[in-house]
Each structure stands twice: as structure tokens, then as C-alpha cells.
Amino acid sequence: MKILVVGSGGREHALVWKLAQSPNAVLHAAPGNPGIAALAECHPFRAEDAEGLLALCLQLEIDLVVIGPEAPLVAGVGDALRRGGLTVFGPSAAAARIEGSKRFAKEVMSAVGVPAPALLDEPRAPCVVKADGLAAGKGVVVCRTQAEADEAWTRAAAFGGDVLVEELLDGEEVSVFALCDGAVARPLPAAQDAKRLLDGDEGPNTGGMGAYSPVPFLSEDEVNDVVDRVHRPVLGELARRRSPFVGLLYAGLMLTDDGPRVLEFNCRFGDPETQSILPLLEDDLLEPLAAAAAGRLGDTEIEASSDAAVTVVLASPGYPEAPEAGARIGGLEAAEGNGALVFHAGTALREGELRSAGGRVLDVTSVAPTSAEARERVYEAIELIDFPDAQFRRDIALKAVHVSG
Ligand code: GLY
């Protein structure tokens, strides 16, 4: 089966890595990255270039397209490929509005009684201010003081769309994922990501500085319960609105004292959560993705091992405001030789040398029987990587270790 994975980050590298384990997979990527290039043939097409991607798929006779990032999904790249006769894992633009418009997501949740934070009439601290549309991770601001709320409102309004204000909830944030075929949803292991730059959840928001899975304060039964109460009703409502969701539905939840509350939906795999989740899957990933894309997920089971995975992101100096690119990177073979998986998130080859080429550069994952061991191994592996002045958090999965060891 010929597969095209669209995207160029660590999430897409993890998807390609997992799909490459399927005996039938012949892998292509667009545009890909130097890590992906070791496993798939890369083609220089941007993820948003629907016309170019369609021509590429037809030329390569691609059987399945897997779209990684949200921007092409919200922009309708999946629709353009489907119109061209392709089978696509990833929602239509209409269904991707569940991520592309926070107001739309609120309407859908309210229609089916999914518990979510209350909307407020004005930005009065404490609160959360959200720009309605996609904002490259900069659209949601937690405001504890009135000055923060006023500034967040001004910034969110500058994106040009609607602005939402929500009550600020307390609790642990977790990500719960389900593969969906438009009608059926199948859970994957839950994860927790680290959104802030610095240890202790301090510093500016980022695209994500690390993740771990499973989450000790959300059992497998509780994950199934969330998928029953959140993903399945939302899937039903989207189908009722004639925009069935085919792809990965990601619910960002706050576990409050009054039960889980949905903070947001994403219409694709989490990044960097995917880099922790996929190494835990015991089953083939190609069959469930192909089945979801073809609307026949049925009883497909997706078994995960009982191990724990920890992913730590190595970011460029200056990230997230002004990342410096061009640093020479080495030692990846040594880290991999030590048992780690090293996913490329923002790298480039310059005259045969691996260089940093983005804010988040490498995602290092270790898997072990306990989160404590996985944590120990991932930080040992990072010591072997030569990336001058890399920023990374030293407390990824510490919470899991404190809860479960
Ligand atoms: N880890 C957050 C996200 O994928 O949006």
C-alpha cells in the first residue's frame, strides 16, 4: 500500500516511523524532513499546496493520504484530495472547524451536552481569553490578573476574528484521542503535554516541550468513559450536520473536581503527544488509519502495551519568540544506540551536515516499564546529543513518577 504522509514535524516523523513497521507500507512524505527521509521518499510540496499534492498523489498512485497538521485540514486540503479520488485520513474543512473555530466547537458541545467551561461576557480575571481561529499556538491565554486579561483581549482581537472568554478552571490537563471514521470512535492511550517553556510550568506558552503516556490519573476505563461522553456525541453531532469527522479527534480536557471539562478540540494527532503514544501501540497503525479513512473502523482494536513513554523536546535558543537556526547537531546515533527514539521536528541538512532549522528541533522518546525508568533513560539519551544551547525541560513526566512511580 502506498501512503503519503503530509507534514514536516516530529508528529509526522513518528507517524512515518510507526507506519514503516507495517509490512505492506511503501512510504512517501511531503515535504518531510531529514529524519523522515531515512524511512520515506520525501517530495518538496508544502502541506497547504492542495493542487501540488493532488498531482503528486495521482502520479505516485497513492492509496492513502495521512494529513498531519491542522492548517491544511482547516484550509480544505483533505477535501481537494478526496475530490481527486483519493482516500484521506484527516477531516474535511467543515469537520476540521471543530479546531478551526472555537465558537463552532462550543456550539457543537452545547448541542450534545459535552461539559465545557462557561463562557463569560467580558474579559474579567481570572479567565481564559481565546482567539476563535487558528493562531499557531498563540490564541489561548490564561489570565490571572486584570492587566493580563486586558492585554490578552487586545492581542486576540488583533487576529481579526471573534474572541471568546471562558471561566478559568483548576485541575490537571490531559489529552484524550480517538480514531474516527465518521461514525465510530476508537480510543488511543491518553497523554499529558507540557505547554510552557520552563520547568514547573513557568515561562511562555510553546507548541509543547514534552509529553508522556499513559497518564496515571486517568485510567483506561476513564479514557473509555471520556470517549463515550465526549468524542462519540461530538462525532454524532458532526455527522448530523453533514460534516462527518474522519481522522483523529483530540479532546483537550481539564480534570476538575466536578469531572472532566473539554477545553478544546483538535482535528489531528497531538504534537508532541504522538511521539509518546505511537511507540506504545502494539498493533499495526496502517490498518486502523486505512479503515478509518474508508469508513470501516468497525470493531478494530488498537492495543497498547503496559509500558510508559516519555518525550522531551529539544528547542533552539531563543524559542519561542526568536529561535536561532543553523546550529550543528550531532550524537543522534549515540542516543538511538542507547535505546531512545529521536524524532526530527525542525532540522535541515546543509552540505551533508544536520542543522537546527526551527523552534522545536528534536523530540527524544524513551519507553520503559515505568515512567520513572522512561524518564531516566530519556534524559540519559539527551546527554549524548550534541546541540549547543538547546533548551529543554527537565521535569517532563515528573508528575507521573510522583503518582505512579
Ligand atoms: N500538544 C498540543 C497540540 O498538539 O496542540
Image: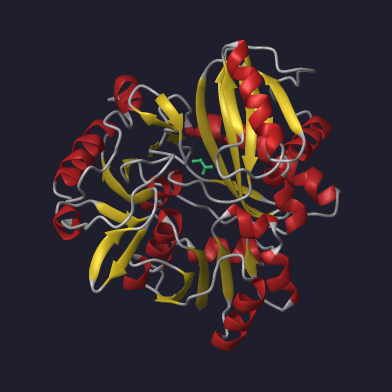
* Residue 149 location (% of width, % of height): 63, 18
Q: Quadrant of residue 83?
A: bottom right
Q: Residue 86 vs residue 252: left or right?
A: right
* Residue 23 location (% of width, % of height): 39, 74
Q: Identify the residue at image location x=74%, y=52%.
A: 95
- Residue lying at the far right in this picture: please name it: 241
Q: Identify the residue at image location x=77%, y=35%.
A: 162
* Residue 320 location (% of width, % of height): 42, 40
The quarter in which the C terminus is drawn is top left
* Residue 102 location (% of width, % of height): 72, 37
Q: Identify the residue at image location x=46%, y=37%.
A: 206
User: Closest to the observer: 274 or 29?
Assistant: 29
Can the viewer see residue 183?
no
Looking at the picture, does residue 183 appear above or below residue 259? below
Q: Residue 249 vs residue 273: left or right?
A: right
Looking at the picture, does residue 61 appear above or below residue 228? below
Q: Count numbered badges in the picture.
A: 0
Q: Identify the residue at image location x=40%, y=54%.
A: 10
- Residue lying at the far bottom in this picture: please name it: 59
Q: Residue 66 vs residue 91: left or right?
A: left
